[in-house]
Amino acid sequence: MMEVRPITSEELSSAIDLKVRCWQEELAGIMDHELSFAQELSFFAEWAESEKEYEDRRILLGAFQNGKLLGAAFGSFAELEDAENAMELNGLWVEEEYRGKGISLSLLKALIREYLDLGRDKMVVYSHHFAPSNQYYRKLHGEMIRQEKQLDGQLLVDVFLHPLNLLDRKLSEMVLKHGEEIDEP
């Protein structure tokens, strides 16, 4: 049985390893840009620990089965210039061999429930325009509020806004279709 729960500091390196491995796939051949595991681990360890300093709530969840990390989702409060009273999806990654089994849906649902409980009502997602995951956020009926260029103008990024209550309902329906049994955090 899969369990969705907070990632411990000891498990963070597994989640960052997954992020780094998924990065080139997300770039979809548009450009070559390597991530450093050490730099990413250092950044996210500091990021997770500094939430109070920035008056933020940073949540890192993992989907585990028999102690193995199958996927991870990171969230935080969104910047006000993106949307008021919103959370931002900072990352959602699933091991390739476990995709299509509802893991990303379960992770996302658990993450947005945490932010709904904190009074947030929208989710902001930055997704590379040509990334395979871009269609995932479109399928969830997010409104694309703008496009911007990142990495020195080389990477076009779509910025989506999702109402959390509607997204929570849609994810519930989709999780039921997959028949996943989850222990939520």
Image (tube, grey):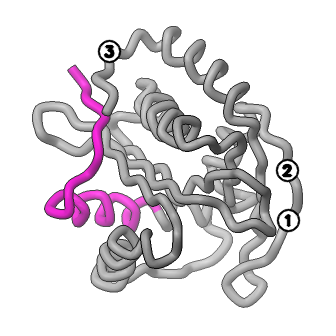
Which region is colored magenta?
1-22
Name, please, the residue furthest toward the bottom. Answer: 152
Q: Of the numbered discs in the image, which one, if any, rests on residue 147?
A: 1
Q: Of the numbered discs in the image, which one, if any, rests on residue 181?
A: 3
3D distance between C-alphas at marks 3 and 2: 31 Å
- Helix, strand or loop status at disc 1: strand
How far across and how far down the image is residue 36, in percent? 36, 83
Q: Quadrant of the C terminus?
A: top left
Which of 122/12 is in front? 122
How far across and how far down the image is residue 91, in percent? 50, 56
User: What residue is drawn where x is 64% and y is 44%?
Assistant: 120
Question: Which class describes the residues within 10 Å of circle 3: few (<14), some (14-19), or many (20+)?
Answer: some
Question: Which class describes the residues within 10 Å of circle 1: few (<14), some (14-19), or many (20+)?
Answer: some
In the displayed structure, would residue 123 be above or below residue 35? above
Is residue 95 among the parts visible in the rendering? no
Is 47 magenta? The answer is no
3D distance between C-alphas at marks 1 and 2: 8 Å
Looking at marks 3 and 2 on the same chain, the residue that comes earlier in the sequence is marked by 2
Which of 163/68 is in front? 163
Which residue type does callout 3 highlight? Glu
In the displayed structure, would residue 60 be above or below residue 181? below
Q: Quadrant of the N terminus?
A: top left
Task: Return the residue at label 2.
Answer: 144
- Helix, strand or loop status at disc 3: loop
Which residue type does callout 2 highlight? Met
- Helix, strand or loop status at disc 2: strand
Q: Are marks 1 and 2 in contact (CB under 8 Å)?
A: yes
Which residue type does callout 1 highlight? Gln
